Image (spheres, rainbow, N blue to C red):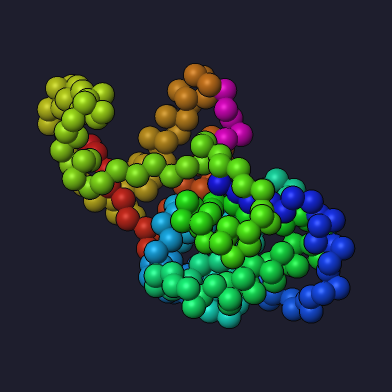
């Protein structure tokens, strides 16, 4: 989901009411892993965009920056040429005592955006964040869900058993695989396997490109993947392979 102010002028006309404090953002880097995860792993926010490996591997595309502001972690990045922000991340579970400092941080983000010449926009806002924002800022934000960017989540039990009618197609796929490759072997992905992984990816990309002609998107995926492989230990990546 994303949020934007109704009109840039809605805030500019009242801008002098606020004392602007510059948020000191810096480019996110691998040495920020402990800082980022001190928030994301302890928060009740669940969003793939908060995965440190994702943040680092896609920085080339989004120019992601971070800052700590009054007990919240703030992300600033670009979608194309438009500046955008993630909703502030806090540690632990949300409680009403956070409302006032949360509101202050959101206003600082808003001021930061307008100062840089962009209407305020938040992306990657989860459902529970909609309720929080609307309760603190009633009738302030235009809210638009974007189904193409929703996270899809399966429970571990459902993936392990693939039970039920809804997962029948996945179950059939696995059964076909086992029938075709009865001697397959699973191995944890280690750094010495990376060249072989890239070779498989190159072959897959060639076939996929012929099917849908999405060269730019595939090139971005490859760049992100390669970045993770290059920084395997630094980002704390885990993976698996099937032979």
Q: Is residue 219 left or right of residue 117?
A: left
Does residue 234 lie above or below 163 as drawn? below
Q: What residue lies at 24% left-to-right and 51% top-to-bottom?
A: 188
Which range is magenta?
Answer: 213-217
Image coords of residue 30 (percent x, y):
50, 67
Q: Is residue 83 left or right of residue 147?
A: right
22 within the magenta span: no
Q: In which image quadrant can residue 86 be found?
A: bottom right
215 within the magenta span: yes
Q: What residue lies at 47% left-to-right and 25% top-to-bottom?
A: 208
Q: Nearer the viewer, residue 94 or 137?
A: 137
Quick one: which residue is furthest to the top in this view?
211
Q: Is residue 158 left or right of residue 100?
A: left
Quick one: which residue is furthest to the left in this view?
182
Q: Nearer the viewer, residue 136 or 168?
A: 136
Q: In which image quadrant can residue 236 be found?
A: bottom left
Q: What residue lies at 84% left-to-right and 67% top-to-bottom?
A: 14
Does residue 15 lie above or below 218 as drawn? below
Q: What residue lies at 57% left-to-right and 27% top-to-bottom?
A: 214
């Amino acid at each position: 989901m994303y949020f934007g102010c109704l009109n840039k002028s809605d805030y500019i006309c009242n801008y002098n009411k606020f004392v602007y404090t510059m948020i000191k953002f810096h480019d996110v880097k691998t040495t920020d892993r402990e800082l980022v995860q001190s928030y994301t792993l302890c928060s009740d926010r669940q969003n793939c965009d908060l995965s440190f490996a994702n943040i680092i591997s896609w920085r080339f595309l989004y120019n992601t920056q971070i800052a700590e502001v009054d007990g919240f972690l703030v992300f600033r990045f670009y979608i194309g040429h438009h500046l955008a922000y993630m909703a502030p991340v806090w540690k632990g579970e949300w409680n009403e005592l956070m409302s006032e400092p949360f509101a202050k941080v959101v206003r600082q983000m808003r001021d930061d955006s307008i100062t840089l010449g962009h209407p305020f926009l938040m992306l990657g806002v989860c459902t529970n964040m909609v309720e929080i924002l609307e309760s603190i800022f009633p009738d302030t934000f235009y809210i638009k869900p974007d189904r193409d960017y929703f996270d899809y989540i399966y429970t571990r039990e459902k993936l392990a058993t693939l039970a039920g009618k809804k997962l029948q197609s996945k179950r059939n796929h696995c059964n076909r695989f086992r029938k075709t490759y009865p001697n397959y072997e699973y191995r944890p992905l280690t750094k010495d396997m990376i060249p072989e992984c890239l070779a498989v990816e190159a072959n897959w990309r060639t076939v996929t490109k012929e099917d849908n002609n999405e060269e730019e998107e595939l090139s971005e995926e490859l760049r992100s993947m390669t970045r993770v492989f290059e920084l395997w230990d630094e980002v704390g990546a885990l993976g698996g392979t099937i032979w």
